Amino acid sequence: MNRYNHSGLHIFRYLMFFIPLFWAGCVKNEIKVEYQLPSNVNDAYRMVYYASDPVKGWFVETVAAVQGGKAQVICVTANPTIVYIPGAGSVPKAAFYAERGDKIKITGEGSDPYSWNISGNRLTEEWNVWRLDNKTVLSSGDYSKINTAVEKYVKANPDNPLSTLLLLIYFNRREDDSRFRGLWQVLKGKALEPKWMQLVGRGDMPGGSPVVPHKVQEMILHTFGNGVDTLHIGNQPVLLYFWREKDAGREDRLILLKKLVEDFPDSTSRIIADVCFDPDSIGWMSVVRKDSLSKVVRGWNFHAETDSLMIRAGVSRTPWFMVFDESGKAVYVGDKSDDADKAFRKTADKKAPKK
């Protein structure tokens, strides 16, 4: 009798060990997002997230078609992710953290994502409190005020992973880079775990310079006049300039590009491209018609910094420059137009004669 009881105990322990693993394996690689808004809300909301899937795509965009205030969206991902509901600029209207199996609930009293409540896990709910406390600041688009709101939270919660996410998603480093670095030094404990930085996947990691980008072999862009073009990188010197119309100092950068075109007129031996990140294609076309910049590739990417290639290349904000030599190696990555100019000239001088 004791022998059978002993054997039964082993079986019981075996089952208790493997049943949780079995149920964990049954969890689908998906996140359910449920909208429960007032019945008069009928709108479509873009949702973008990193799916970490080399087959289905690292970057995924879907749409929540809210009808009568209701919608359900399935985000497919095996790994934890951040789901963004983008705004017109670089600040998302709403965002949340989720893992496979999570059920995210979005509620609110209207159609404005800045005022929505988002729940479903502890980190998202902490994030939701911060978002709602600062919804007026976030919706204003005032980077100075947004940076201050982030700073206040980070200093009060230096070991909270949310501090890391707020710094990387909301803090405008171009507005005050030294302040960003100072706040990064404040972080400690769980906030410094690499997984939180990897979630965001941006190029504005702390340190003296941006992360070294992956080698870029080609870049597909919507282009003015041609529809879609593919830039092939690796056979000639390349300068890429990423911008928004509101960027301060854009006129000076245009003068720099026009001078480069004048000094290196042979477009078969070099590529110079400016890529607009503004969300409105009509606005982009209006700007490029007026600025008289010619003999360069006029590109547009409405996904901006959330585009999968931009993420891998380390393009984290505007203005931003990337210069590649004829082998495809990045010889300059950053926001200094003079340094980009020098790097391109040095590379192009070896490849093509001046005018």
Image (spheres, rainbow, N blue to C red):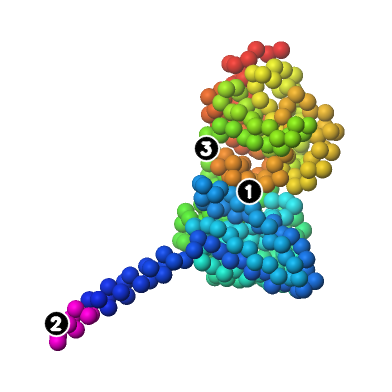
- How packed mark 2 is, by other alpha carbons closer than 10 Å (few <14, some 14-19, many 20 or more), is few
Can you tell which mark lies on residue 3?
2
Q: Earlier in the sequence, mark 3 or mark 2?
A: 2
Is disc 3 in contact with disc 2, using a CB cutoff of under 8 Å?
no
Which amino acid is tagged 1? Thr
Decide: few, some or many residues near mark 3? Use Cα within 10 Å; few <14, some 14-19, many ≥20.
few
Camera-side residue: 72 or 143?
Answer: 72
Quick one: label 1, few (<14), some, or many (20+) residues within 10 Å? many
Distance Cα–Cα, label 3 vs label 2: 62 Å
Residue 188, percent across and down? 48, 59
The first of marks 2 and 1 along the sequence is 2
Q: Secondary structure at mark 3?
A: loop
**Which is more toward the observer, 49 or 305?**
49
Q: Which residues are magenta?
A: 1-9
Residue 165 locus on image (x, y percent): 57, 58
Magenta span contains residue 161 = no
Q: Secondary structure at mark 1?
A: helix
Q: Residue at horizontal 82%, vertical 43%?
A: 282
Q: Main secondary structure of the magenta part?
A: helix
* Location of mark 3 (residue): 214
The amino acid pointed to by label 3 is His
Label of residue 306 in the image: 1
Q: Residue at x 67, y 45 (%)?
A: 304
With respect to residue 301, does 180 lie above or below?
below
Q: Are marks 3 and 1 in contact (CB under 8 Å)?
A: no
Element type at mark 2: helix
Q: Quadrant of residue 243?
A: top right
The three-letter code of the residue at mark 2 reads Arg
Give the Cα separation between the discs numbered 3 and 1.
16 Å
